[in-house]
Amino acid sequence: MANMTSLPYSGYRALLVHAHPDDETINNGATMAHYASLGAHITLITCTRGEEGEVLVPGLSHLAASENDQLGNHRITELANAMIELGIKDHRFLGNEEVMFRDSGMMGTEPNNRPDVFWQADLDTAARMVVDVIQEVKPHVLITYDEIGGYGHPDHIQAHRVAMRAAELSLQSGNKWEIQKIYWNAMPKSIIAQGIEAMKASGSDFFGAESVDDLPFVKADELVTAVVDGTAMVDAKMAAMKAHETQIALDGPFFALSNNLGSQIWGLEFYSLVKGTASAPFNSDGRETDLFAGIIAE
C-alpha cells in the first residue's frame, strides 16, 4: 500500500456538513471516496441522527419515532458502516455531551416544534460547534446544501445556514481559518430529466415525478459549475447506500435509477461553487473537474 504522504492529495482537506445519516452518501459518496483514496483528509459532520426517518425495513419498524424511538441509535451504526465502505475515518455528529440535535422531521410536522430539534437550534450556537471542527481540521474546501436545503427539509436548510455561518465565524475567531472554496450540492436538470425518461420507458418513476419540473432539487444546468468523476468509486458508493438499510430501499428509486441508467450515474457528482475561484481543469461543459483545483494547501 502506498504511503499516505506519497499520495497526490495528501495535505488537502475537505469538510462536509450534512443533516442526517445517508445524505452524505447519496450526495457526495463518490466524491468522498475518490478524494480519500488519493490521500485527502475528509471530515464529515452529521447534524442529527435521523430519528424521524421512515423505516423501510419491516423487521425494524419498532425502531421508529412513533414506536420505540430507537432509530437514531441504529442509524449511528448505519453511518459508521457506510463510512467504512467509503474509506472515511473522520466522521462525527454535531454537538457535545451537553447538547445534541434531534431530527426535525419534514416541514410543518409536529416534531418541528420540539425544543431539542435541529430546526430550533440557535444558529450561532450550532455554528460555533462547526467552527471548533474547522479550527481543528483546517479544511480548504467546504461542501453543504444550497439555501433551500436541496428540497426544503428543515434540517437541510438549517445545515446550510449553520455551515455558512461557521465559515463566516471562522474568519472572526482568535484562531482564524479561511475556507478557500465553498460548494453547494447540485443536480443538473438535464441529468435528472434523462433519468426520469429512462425510468418512464421501463414503466417506473422517480419519486412519482412525471416531469423534471416536478422535482424541487434540480438546478438549471448553467448554475452547476463543477463535477467530480468518481465512477471508479461507484461500487463503494453503492455499498455505502446499502449500509443505510432503513432509509434506502434496494427496490426504491435510487437503485431503480441505477437499473435503468447503470450504476455509473452515481459516479458523477455535481456542485455549484459559491466561494472561491473556479480553476482548471474544466470539462467540455465548462465545469471544474477538481474541487481542490487552485487550492494552496497549508
Image: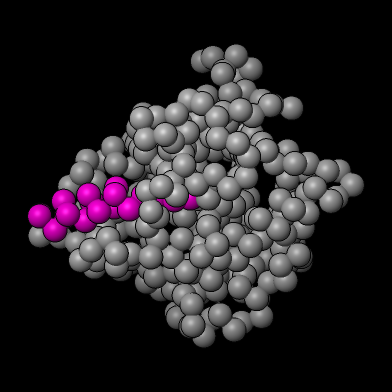
Q: Residue furthest right?
A: 174
Residue 41: x and y, percent?
Answer: 62, 33
Please say whether residue 82 is visible from this viewpoint: no
- Residue beneath the point at 54% across and 81% down: 111
Q: Is residue 193 rendered magenta in the image?
A: yes
- Residue 115 against residue 35 in the figure, above or below: below
Taking the image as shown, residue 194 lies to the left or right of residue 55, namely: left
Q: Quadrant of the C terminus?
A: top right
Q: Is residue 261 rendered magenta in the image?
A: no
Residue 261: x and y, percent?
Answer: 20, 44
Taking the image as shown, residue 14 lies to the left or right of residue 136, namely: left
Q: Quadrant of residue 219?
A: bottom left
Residue 21: x and y, percent?
Answer: 50, 56
- Residue beneath the point at 56% across and 52% down: 144
Judged by its main secondary structure, the magenta piece is: helix
Q: Quadrant of residue 134?
A: top right
**Rendered image coloring scheme:** one colour
Camera-side residue of 231 and 70 = 231
- Residue beneath the point at 64% across and 34% down: 13
- Residue 112 against residue 21 in the figure, above or below: below
- Residue beneath the point at 72% across and 63% down: 126
Camera-side residue of 103 and 198 = 198
**Which contiguous range is marked in magenta?**
185-202
Camera-side residue of 167 and 154 = 167
Count of marks, rendered view: 0
Please say whether residue 171 is visible from this viewpoint: yes
Q: Quadrant of residue 147?
A: bottom right
- Residue 259 against residue 231 in the figure, above or below: below
